Image: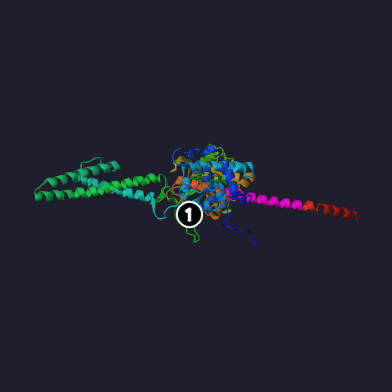
Amino acid sequence: MYKDYNMNQVTLSLDLEIYLEKNDIVFIINELVESIPEESFEPFQHNMGTSSYHPRMMLKLILCGYTQSIFSGRKIEEMAKDSIRARWLTQSQMPNFRTINRFRVNPHVQDLLKECFIHFRNQLVTQKLIDEEAIFIDGTKIEANANKYTFVWKKSINNYEDSLTNKSKELYHQLVQEQIIPAIQNEDEPLHLENLREITHSLETEVSNLTDKINNENNVEKRKALRNKRIKPRKYLKQFRDFKTRTQKYQKQKAILNKRNSYSKTDNDATFMRMKDDHMKNGQLKPGYNVQIATNNQYVLAYDVFQNPTDFKTLIPFLETIKDNYFKLPKYIVADAGYGSEENYQAIMDDFERIPLITYTMYQKEVKKKYRTNPFNVTNWRYDELLDVYFCPLNRRLKFKRYSTRIDKYGFKRNLKLYECESCKNCPIRSSCTKAKSNKNRVIQKNYNWEYFKAHAKALINAEETGKIYKQRKIDVEPAFGNLKANLSFTRFSVRGKDKVVNELGFALMAINIRKLTAYRQLKSTNELKNKDLKMIFSFLNPYFFILETFGSAS
């Protein structure tokens, strides 16, 4: 006997919710998106043209697709037609892939996703799934949707531009000497784009005048002489037109680069970065973005995208993004040694007024016995505070010489104190102590501001309470990247341009949050069901235990 199955019988459509499990992932998606106030969707409204799909429905559909590792607009369209989950979320509305892709890269979606993260965090705080004492920050590099072999390097542009400047200046001097064009500036000044345009215009005028003379001249010999005279100006004109075009090209490329060292021609916002080694241990330079996230209990609470491949320059702007767009910064800011710098420590403690639980690059090395017992380490040298003097391994004095200020390429100023040895002459251990020339004494520099921050960070990490929080970093923020890349299979962006990349990353990170919360609720429900069954069993067996206990004690 079979269950009733008839394709020709007309049936009424039923609510698709009955086909979904109790703690299905779509219920969390629906709960999250419905918690966003209607005012957040107002920027999507328009009064012209045909009616559009509700952005609340579009947001639910794309989040559903990303939770299932579906990132293609066409595949999300197929999911909207075939998946019971998607059909329930959209109430059987089926937007096509163009509509999905346009919504995904819409500039207003960025603010909508921020609202998602804010409301999601509020739910986690209410349910006591996270604490508000600390955030754990880390970054990873994700490959851009760009060609790996079409790139522009700042160093190459500078070299080409220098070569072009020298060639154009040399040709300009030849033009002036041969009296083809008049002098337009001093000989020592380089030629700028305006100068090249002026020279090009002068040459065009000269060639045009000679051409008119040739056309108006009937004498064959004179026409031949005029043609010969026109050869050089035409040759120079071609070269200066090329110089002008190349100069414009280099200026445009430098404007795209801004402070970066490289960019991809197919995605100008992507920077070439050193990605993690592949299975053959080959590190490769690929166009990508530096993704920064802040987590607590493995939930991603905030994110941002940077074009700078180094982490230590992203911390301050990322903290400002969190403070301005997501939530109030917690008491502790936890990160690894890649963020440990004087500028970051100073900003967190002075500007943000928070406690940094961040190591620095040399921390692991400094705690080792070999480093602490090395006599040539300046940090191990004896220091006399009253005399402000250091003593080298041979007990020679290094006296204060002068103050020094250094400003890095990013504009951060460091104040240093320089100490010079009284005499390194005839020193038997000179080769082990310094690489300076033989006629110069050993000079050391001390940045006491940096030394204070390092000592403060070391004390915090070695303390019991704060050390426990710092140790949690590896098991908190790292699994988020594991879930993103390994479990969600999000290893490459599918859109181009930083703003669009920020949108897509928001969908992907919210997807791993939803998956994690779903798994937690399902596990909690299973445990509650088991506990309920155990209670029923014990309540059923309880009278028998009572009888056994009573008669057993009587006997």
> Is residue 441 one of those drawn in magenta?
no
Which residue: 27% across, 49% down? 242
From the top left corner, tell me how far across and down residue 282 is, in percent.
47, 59
Quadrant of the frame with the N terminus = bottom right
Q: State whether the magenta stretch is mostly helix, strand or loop.
A: helix
- 368 displayed left or right of 542: left
- Residue 63: horizontal and vertical position, in percent? 54, 48
| Quarter of the figure with the C terminus | bottom right
Is 319 placed left or right of 544 in the picture? left
Q: Is residue 203 above or below residue 285?
A: above
- x and y, in percent, of residue 491 in the image: 50, 54
Q: Nearer the viewer, residue 245 or 340?
A: 245
- For this orientation, the residue located farthest to the front is 9
Question: Which region is colored magenta?
Answer: 513-536
Q: How many marks?
A: 1
Q: Is residue 165 visible?
A: no
Let me know if residue 367 appears in the view.
yes
Q: Secondary structure at mark 1?
A: loop
- 10 Å crowding of disc 1: few (<14), some (14-19), many (20+): some
Percent of width and height locating residue 313 = 48, 45
In the depicted view, which residue is nearer to us: 226 or 77? 77
Q: Nearer the viewer, residue 492 or 398?
A: 492
| Residue that extends furthest to the bottom in the rendered view of this protein | 1
Scheme by which the image is coloured = rainbow
Tag 1: amino acid = Met
The residue furthest left is 219
Task: Find out whether residue 517 is within the magenta segment.
Answer: yes
Mark 1 = which residue?
275
Q: Residue at x 26, y 46 (%)?
A: 169
Judge by depth and name the residue closer to the eye, 348 or 218: 218
Q: Residue furthest right?
A: 555
